[in-house]
Amino acid sequence: MPKVGPPRCDDVALPGCSPSSSRPASRLRHALYPASWRQAIVPPLLAVIWACGSDADARDSSAQASSIRDSAGIAIVESRLPSWESGTEWRVGQLLVSIGEATGELEYELFRVLDATRLSDGTVAVANMSTSEIRLFDAAGRFLRSLGRVGGGPGEFQAEGLRRVDHVQGDSLFAWDLLAQRMSVFAPDGEFVRSTRLRNTNRMYFFDGLFADRSMLMRLNRPDTSSRFVEGYTRNTVRFLRFGGQGDSLGRLGEFPGSEEYWRRWGERGMVGDDAPFGKVTSARAGPDRAYVATGDSYEVWVFSTTAELEMSIRKEHPPVPVSADVARGWDEERAARLKGHEPGWDYSSLLDDMVLPDVLPAYGSIQVDASSNLWVEEYDEAGERGPEWSVFDPRGVWLGCVRIPAGLEVFEIGNDYILGREVDDAEVEYVRVYELVKP
């Protein structure tokens, strides 16, 4: 299994060591590409995690909620109970802004929104991938203007290339074009400033966030192009790197086992694949001066400095949760629904038939880092679907407790007093919504 730097196997459960101790669930991707294109076709993976399991009211006052210890300069933070006292828990409050309409003015009809961010004055920037433009809405949700269009010129995006939008202090907007491998920067008033391509590379990189110094956390899937393609269940290696604002490489963060997938051959040279059902998911997020990496092997998230030094291991007590009969039935229902709209030309149903459910659910799925450097970890619910509860860990790595978000909200960004994300109704109409985050 791939390793992260020189692994310390005594206390930190890094890949390669023996441990010392996208949305409704898995809307699976289905794709058909020649095997040589495999490294370039990993879209954002979708994941979920198990419910928090501990209630502040059920706290054992004699038990230690969290412990922090040092191991060779690395902080090991282990939590078994939430530390919020009753009445101090954070919660999601009222809906502040809702953007999107089923019919009406075209600017409000959203389709294939993959990301959004909120500026200091409340302006919401929406990455509408289907039209290759960023749409700006004011704090009340009124349309202001669009940035970009389909093309290869300054401030333009490749068709369906616009995947991420982010901002830093000062409200400059950063937009990542996956297909062009280019970062475009816009001023707070929407004027185009510059664009940057990654230097000295001909590979496809995925953007995982901005650091405070405007350097970029990037992900490279399957960095070893000489490795043989593996049929069946697999976890290919992923590499996380940091790039400067001019596109220059600032070094590797490390290599990790990637998300679990299932692949099989199609025809003489093609491959067809999908995310493994309830598979472990590898993801990373950038905080102001830290990078957070999660692989789902156990309830553990690693925290690195921007210079790739491992600083902290954040852990939470989490007994293995078996895949129940209800979870299996839910998978069957989702499988049937997914088959109704799959692309013609290949037998997608046989691919799904080949997949076998795991014995236990993953420890967790997607992660976020909020504006105050708190780590948020999404939990599974009892049906194996994306649960509405997220565990929150403070910058020291201590588990604070759980926040219940609106069911079906795909979280894009968490600020000091808001949560921003996407919701889709029964008619498949997309909405970008901002909810109040209440902190007593």
Image (cartoon, rainbow, N blue to C red):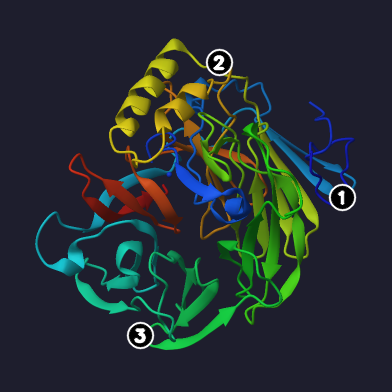
Distance (Cα) linking label 1 and label 2: 35 Å
- Between residues 242 and 55, which one lies in front from this camera angle? 242
Distance (Cα) linking label 1 and label 3: 44 Å
Q: Which residue is mark 2?
A: 322
Q: Is residue 40 left or right of residue 190?
A: right
User: Against 333, is 257 above or below?
Assistant: below
- What's the mark number on residue 400? none
Precedes in sequence: disc 1 or disc 3: 1
SS class, disc 3: loop
Precedes in sequence: disc 1 or disc 2: 1
Do the residues under discs 1 and 3 have CB atoms within 8 angstroms? no
Distance (Cα) linking label 3 and label 2: 51 Å
The percent position of residue 4, horizontal first and vertical second, equals 80, 48
Name which residue lies at 63% across and 75% down. Answer: 198
Q: Is residue 56 left or right of residue 214?
A: left
Q: Which residue is mark 1?
A: 73
SS class, disc 1: loop
Callout 2 crowding tier (Cα within 10 Å): few <14, some 14–19, many ≥20 = few
Number of dots carrying numbers: 3
Name which residue lies at 53% across and 20% down. Answer: 357
Q: Which residue is mark 3?
A: 189
Say what amino acid the circle numbered 3 marks: Asp
The percent position of residue 274, horizontal first and vertical second, equals 50, 38
Callout 1 crowding tier (Cα within 10 Å): few <14, some 14–19, many ≥20 = few
Q: Toward which corner of the image does residue 116 lie, by quadrant?
A: bottom left
